[in-house]
Image (cartoon, grey):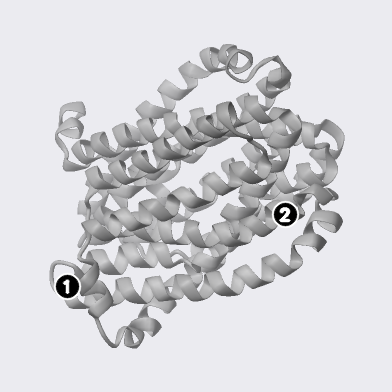
Amino acid sequence: MWKSILKTATFRQSQITILGTVINGALGFLFYIVLARFLGPSDFGLLTVSLASLVLIADIADIGTNTGLVRFVSLNLAVDSEKAYRFLKLSLEIKLIAWLISFFVIFYLSPLLATQVFHKEELILPLRLVAFGAGAALLFTFATSMLQAYQKYFLWSVVNVLTNLLRLVLILVLGYFLALNVESSLAVYIILPLFGFAITLLIVPARKIFASRNEFSLSKVLLQYNIPVAIFTIISAFSARLDTFLNAALLSSREVGIYGAASQLAQVVPQLVAALGLVAAPKFAGFQSLNQMLTYFKKFQLLISGLCLLGILSIPLLVYLIPIIYGQGYQGAVIPFIFLFLAMLVFLFSVPVHISVIFYFARPDIFIWISIGHLLIIGGLGYLLISNYGIVGASITVLIGTIFNFLYPFIWFLKKIYEKS
């Protein structure tokens, strides 16, 4: 069984993306370590809230476009390349329009959000930078989704690694030779994705994509698929960062910074999830029979289970390294990290089920209900636990929410398999 797993194309492609993700994750991890040590817990807390806001805005403005892009470009690239180019151009135009709208809304509302929601006036300028940065994030995810649809996994890794390497170098230069603060850190975070987008345009047939015509004739097909994805993405994106936003509203900037450090250390797992999903999503989208999908699914789940076991065994070492990596000021991150890391391992374990539901069964609408349930858990239970137990309560809430995110689609998946067998 294990030999057959190791021989699969997915495993070989996963090796490329996992290696790229490990390097990319290491660079991202170093980036946040440098920021945490240079800025200190309080300013790092402000940066954490700003970055959470940036990612949330970009996820909302994406309107499910990345998922739709991968599905429809992957389906049409081999049989009708011109149609695939039209889907790509339409996806880019949707992203640009959504970004312009979100930019003006967030830029105008920044003072209100900073003072009335987060109760931190010093967030006004960072949130205005975030309004611009969401556009850079949208363009970068468009670029990486294109590479995923083309199944150019090595180049996907190169673009991500190069972008994060340059980001780290710039932060080190600012930290040691110039001035590093919340605003300059955000500026570096925002600028480099634009470089990654530009590099990707040199890899794909950009001229053919931009020269394609009548792309809006595909808007009905794309949006019919995207809208359920967008609804669940918006809800899940908000609930995924609601713990950080509740921390910002209820706790001090210093506590938010400590929680942010714990959260960043646990982010190595979502990086791995992204790499595996990058390879598996086009595969599940292309399966023509249930037996074909299940054969692949079983091997994929075994691979994931092995990675989860390795993650559990690594917890003692990671706990030991926290004060060494971040400094003694972040000692309070240990307990929250354990709960957050376990939550991310549950997330990793659920990847085969999630991808099969979205890409094989083409039922992204299932995740709308999952996202609503998760939002209620994080918002309701999270408020109570954070109010009483601070950042430890926040991390426990994340674990409970992630378990729910696995169980609901897993039960749906088993029921669907039973009906079809």
Image vertical order of residue 44 relative to residue 84, above or below: above
Give whichever of 163, 231 is nearer the camera. 163
Q: Dividing the picture into quarters, in which one does residue 116 lie?
A: bottom right
**Mark 2 and mark 1: Cα distance apart in space:** 44 Å
Which of labels 2 and 1 is toward the front?
A: 2
321 vs 376, left or right, is left
Image vertical order of residue 46 relative to residue 25, above or below: below
Q: Amino acid at mark 2?
A: Leu
326 vs 173, left or right, is right
Q: Earlier in the sequence, mark 2 or mark 1?
A: 1
Name the residue at 36% across, 80% down: 221
Give whichever of 244, 289 is nearer the camera. 244
Q: Amino acid at mark 1?
A: Ser
* The N terminus lies in quadrant: top left
Image vertical order of residue 190 relative to residue 138, above or below: above
Name the residue at 83% across, 38% down: 251
Q: Which residue is mark 2?
A: 125
251 vs 107, left or right, is right
Q: Which residue is mark 1?
A: 81
Name the residue at 22% across, 56% down: 203
* Label 2: which secondary element: helix
